């Protein structure tokens, strides 16, 4: 078959890889000048920075992205580095101890900080273990067949019944059921600010999944009842290595990638997708069309509401997106490790995640005061900076549309204010900056095919139905962070694989 894939982010690259593997004639059309979407690495003056993913879950051989890379025969094309991260709140910082103190050292640390919450912490970590076991079994189930599939399915049911009572609870309700202290709740809900999702609307079962203990201590044994824990890795020399692995596979299998090729329309006839129209007016026909851009842009601009059921239109119109980010990349000429001992640390400036998200959604930008992230890729990949220097990324959530001014006129001002906040932890960033790259929401938008930039796609909120892979239009399959797979590198790749295998089976 002739297959057209729209977009060269990881979703598009995964779809093209699997279609090429089956011998189909595949071409990717990318509107930007570079391949990779936000899973890209940028370079300037001898420094390199990733613009999207940081410390990734899913790359280990027992995890879904690792298994996919093995399935495609490209796992040896990247080198992964097992690491963990720090977490700093206004009143305390959480770093793994120099001497390993067991898989539950964080629980004991929190008991010291909040003695009145000891009983709740014991109950929470029992809940955490139950969720981890459930997810470990489910991860194995997804790759099993026959009798093993049936055996794992039977094993899964009793584990699920133990946590079923939490299914309809939000993250806020889950935390309220375990703890009274707002500061302790914020330890486990702080990461939701990264998604720009309120604790009152985030699925409660997702709290332990967003706070896997291996993210904070890489020494924790992975083996648990039912399988293995998730584990976190960097990609040596940046995420472009992962992009290149997919790109080379596609080209080796005969696939083609066309950059600077903006798709303006998906051609529909008799409720079937039959091709695309490029900005230059050229029409190209195919048996299968697989877009991976934003939901609004894909279905309302490329397809058009006239071809879609009213219920589908209503769902897309009411989707809640994450907000964007302001990201500043620096090249510095000093060693930051006396101030931050690991490559990545989240710095939280508020305990009220609910209100912080409300303000961000209303366009009220906190200028870094409510939190940011500091990442030094050259700590794990020295080639990403000149000898004796370091590459640093500072980013924080930010509204796509500011309530005061705009990103064009306030670009330098707001970048400088973010650096001022970062210098409270890493002094001298501005003074020692040898080069700088500022990325506002508008810069991110230019790289991907969306109506507005949302860092990570659709907000992971309760009861939200992301658009399905199998669309109402025949021969049109939708993939990417705003599809049913949701965001995240591993989630997008695994969701796309699932969609393509289903497509091939139906054909």
Image (cartoon, rainbow, N blue to C red):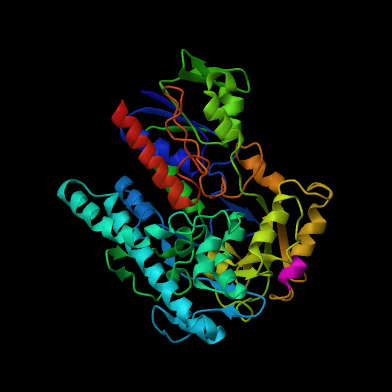
- Residue 421 is covered by the magenta coloring: yes
Picture quarter containing residue 272? top left
Q: Nearer the viewer, residue 367 or 431?
A: 367
The answer to whether residue 263 shows anywhere in this view is no
279 lies above or below 18? above
Q: Position of residue 297 (x, y in %)?
A: 60, 32
Q: Residue at x 33, y 63 (%)?
A: 162
Quadrant assignment for the N terminus: top left
Q: Residue at x 65, y 36 (%)?
A: 451
Picture quarter containing residue 89? bottom right
Q: Residue at x 64, y 70 (%)?
A: 347
Farthest left residue in view: 147
Q: Nearer the viewer, residue 199 or 455?
A: 199
Q: Nearer the viewer, residue 213 or 50?
A: 213
The answer to whether residue 113 shows anywhere in this view is yes
Look at the image and give the residue range highlighted in magenta.
Answer: 419-423
**Dominant SS type (magenta):** helix
Q: Position of residue 482 (x, y in %)?
A: 53, 41
105 lies above or below 71? below
Q: Position of residue 94 (x, y in %)?
A: 55, 78
- Residue 139 is covered by the magenta coloring: no
């Amino acid at each position: 078959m002739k297959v057209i894939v729209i977009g060269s982010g990881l979703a598009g690259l995964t779809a093209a890889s699997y279609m090429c593997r089956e011998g189909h004639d595949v071409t990717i059309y990318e509107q930007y000048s570079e391949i990779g979407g936000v899973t890209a690495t940028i370079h300037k003056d001898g420094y390199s920075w990733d613009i999207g993913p940081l410390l990734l879950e899913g790359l280990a051989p027992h995890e879904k992205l690792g298994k996919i890379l093995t399935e495609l025969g490209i796992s040896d094309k990247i080198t992964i580095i097992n690491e963990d991260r720090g977490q700093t709140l206004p009143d305390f910082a959480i770093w793994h101890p120099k001497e390993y103190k067991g898989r539950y050292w964080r629980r004991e640390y929190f008991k010291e900080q909040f003695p009145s919450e000891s009983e709740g912490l014991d109950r929470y970590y029992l809940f955490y273990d139950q969720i981890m076991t459930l997810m470990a079994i489910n991860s194995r189930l997804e790759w099993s067949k026959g009798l093993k599939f049936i055996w794992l399915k039977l094993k899964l049911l009793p584990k699920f019944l133990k946590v079923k009572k939490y299914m309809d609870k939000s993250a806020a309700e889950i935390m309220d059921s375990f703890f009274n202290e707002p500061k302790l709740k914020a330890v486990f809900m702080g990461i939701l600010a990264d998604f720009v999702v309120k604790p009152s609307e985030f699925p409660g079962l997702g709290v332990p999944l967003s706070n896997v203990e291996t993210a904070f201590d890489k020494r924790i044994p992975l083996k648990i009842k039912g399988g293995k824990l998730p584990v976190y890795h960097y990609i040596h020399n940046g995420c472009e290595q992962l992009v290149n692995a997919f790109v080379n596979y596609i080209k080796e299998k005969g696939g083609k990638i066309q950059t600077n090729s903006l798709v303006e329309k998906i051609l529909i006839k008799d409720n079937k997708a039959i091709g695309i129209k490029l900005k230059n007016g050229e029409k190209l026909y195919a048996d299968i069309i697989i877009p991976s851009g934003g939901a609004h842009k894909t279905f309302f601009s490329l397809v058009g509401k006239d071809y879609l059921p009213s219920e589908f239109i209503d769902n897309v119109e009411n989707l809640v997106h994450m907000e964007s980010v302001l990201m500043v990349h620096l090249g510095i000429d000093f060693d930051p490790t006396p101030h931050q001992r690991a490559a990545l640390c989240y710095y939280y400036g508020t305990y009220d995640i609910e209100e912080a998200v409300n303000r961000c959604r209303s366009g009220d930008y906190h200028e870094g005061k409510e939190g940011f992230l500091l990442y030094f890729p050259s700590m794990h990949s020295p080639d990403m900076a000149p000898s004796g220097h370091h590459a640093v990324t500072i980013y924080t959530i930010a509204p796509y549309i500011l309530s005061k001014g705009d990103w064009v006129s306030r670009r330098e001002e707001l970048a400088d204010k973010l650096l001022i906040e970062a210098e409270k932890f890493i002094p001298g960033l501005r003074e020692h900056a040898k080069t700088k790259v500022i990325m506002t929401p508008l810069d991110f938008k230019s790289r991907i095919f969306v109506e507005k930039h949302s860092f990570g796609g659709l907000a992971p909120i309760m009861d939200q139905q992301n658009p399905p892979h199998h669309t109402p239009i025949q021969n049109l399959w939708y993939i990417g962070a705003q599809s049913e797979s949701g965001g995240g590198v591993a989630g997008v790749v695994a969701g796309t694989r699932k969609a393509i295998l289903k497509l091939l089976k139906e054909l």
